[in-house]
Image (spheres, helix red, strand yellow):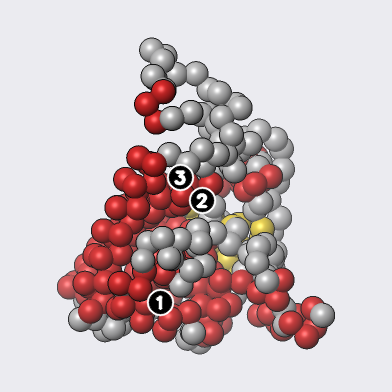
């Protein structure tokens, strides 16, 4: 169907046969579709997620906290297979009515505390551990500004460009061009910021970097949507420098593996319940 052949109806109705990679789980209503309680492991922090960019943000922070010596940041990471509709189970909907990953339950207090939305989880963990979020007003404002920049901008990169470029059942020139333009504008914003700063919010590594890297870092490194050449990412030299530096961090490597179910099996850790779980995910042992 060409771009100009469609006329919106007077009243929209849900077309279950609309197609696309995620057609089987997309729906215009909320709420649980089936009863399924969530498992609970032995650590105070219980993460329910999948290794998408939004999920990777949180596992990177948790691994960075552990690497920085915060032993009480140990966590269980349970796999929520969004392609199979796990996010619509009753237990998950109870802790996240929006049915999107990631969701975290913090059992460190008198009552379990459920947090959803990746940005909220990053802030909660950074504040509770006193790490990766400055306390000085100016530095804190910069980090939070870039954190919320990511939260507001990434839907245009993922749900916009990524969807129409990589996942939509029909390639629509107008949609791809529109969102490619916006994706490149966002990369230019980052490139200009990183030209004069080691990290996104300044000279210190922060939750802003951890939020932005899984989306924009992986795009320029060719690990997301297969669109690096299409977007001519070589233009964004400062973003590439930053993306490569973060990709080399051991905690980022580990965080990227957690709840991952695609790619090289040696880089997948579908569930994580102990730091020693990473030792099992080496190429020689898998072979």
Q: Is residue 220 visible?
A: yes
Q: Which residue is mark 3?
A: 164
Secondary structure at numbered mark 1: helix
Q: Is residue 203 above or below residue 169?
A: below
Work out whether residue 185 or residue 265 is closer to the camera in this orientation and state it: 185
Q: Which mark is residue 82?
A: none
The reply to whether dot 3 and dot 1 touch (C-beta < 8 Å) is no
Q: CA distance from mark 3 to mark 2?
A: 6 Å
Secondary structure at numbered mark 3: helix
Q: Residue at x 42, y 84 (%)?
A: 245
Work out whether residue 217 or residue 230 is closer to the camera in this orientation and state it: 230
- Where residue 103 sits in the image (x, y, percent)? 54, 54
Q: Which mark is residue 166?
A: 2
Work out whether residue 154 or residue 106 is closer to the camera in this orientation and state it: 154
Q: Which residue is mark 1?
A: 243
- Horizontal side of 222 relative to 34 (left or right) equals left
Circle 3 Cα neighbour tier, 10 Å, few/some/many (<14 / 14–19 / ≥20): many
Along the polypeptide, which appears first: circle 1 or circle 2?
2
Q: CA distance from mark 3 to mark 1?
A: 24 Å
Q: Residue at x 69, y 45 (%)?
A: 84
The reply to whether dot 3 and dot 2 touch (C-beta < 8 Å) is yes
Secondary structure at numbered mark 2: helix
- Where residue 53 sits in the image (x, y, percent)? 49, 61
Q: Quadrant of residue 220?
A: bottom left
- Where residue 36 sits in the image (x, y, percent)? 72, 43
Q: Residue furthest top?
A: 10
């Amino acid at each position: 169907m060409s771009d100009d052949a469609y006329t919106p109806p007077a009243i929209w109705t849900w077309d279950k046969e609309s197609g696309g990679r995620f057609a089987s789980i997309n729906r215009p209503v909320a709420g649980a579709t089936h009863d399924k309680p969530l498992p609970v492991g032995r650590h105070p922090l219980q993460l329910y997620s999948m290794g998408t960019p939004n999920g990777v943000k949180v596992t990177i922070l948790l691994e960075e906290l552990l690497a920085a010596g915060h032993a009480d940041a140990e966590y269980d990471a349970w796999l929520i297979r969004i392609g199979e509709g796990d996010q619509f189970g009753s237990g998950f909907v109870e802790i996240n009515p929006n049915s999107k990953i990631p969701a975290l339950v913090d059992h460190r207090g008198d009552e379990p505390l459920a947090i959803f939305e990746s940005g909220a989880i990053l802030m909660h963990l950074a504040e509770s551990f006193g790490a990766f979020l400055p306390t000085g007003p100016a530095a804190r404002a910069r980090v939070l500004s870039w954190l919320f920049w990511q939260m507001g901008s990434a839907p245009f990169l993922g749900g916009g460009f990524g969807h129409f470029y990589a996942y939509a059942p029909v390639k629509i020139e107008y949609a791809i061009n529109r969102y490619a333009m916006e994706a490149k504008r966002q990369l230019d914003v980052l490139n200009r910021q990183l030209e004069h700063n080691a990290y996104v919010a300044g000279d210190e590594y922060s939750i802003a970097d951890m939020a932005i890297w899984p989306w924009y870092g992986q795009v320029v490194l060719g690990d997301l949507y297969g669109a690096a050449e299409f977007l001519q990412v070589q233009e964004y030299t400062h973003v590439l420098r930053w993306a490569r530096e973060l990709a080399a961090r051991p905690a980022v490597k580990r965080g990227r593996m957690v709840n991952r179910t695609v790619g090289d099996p040696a880089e997948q850790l579908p569930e994580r319940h102990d730091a020693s779980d990473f030792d099992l995910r080496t190429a020689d042992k898998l072979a």
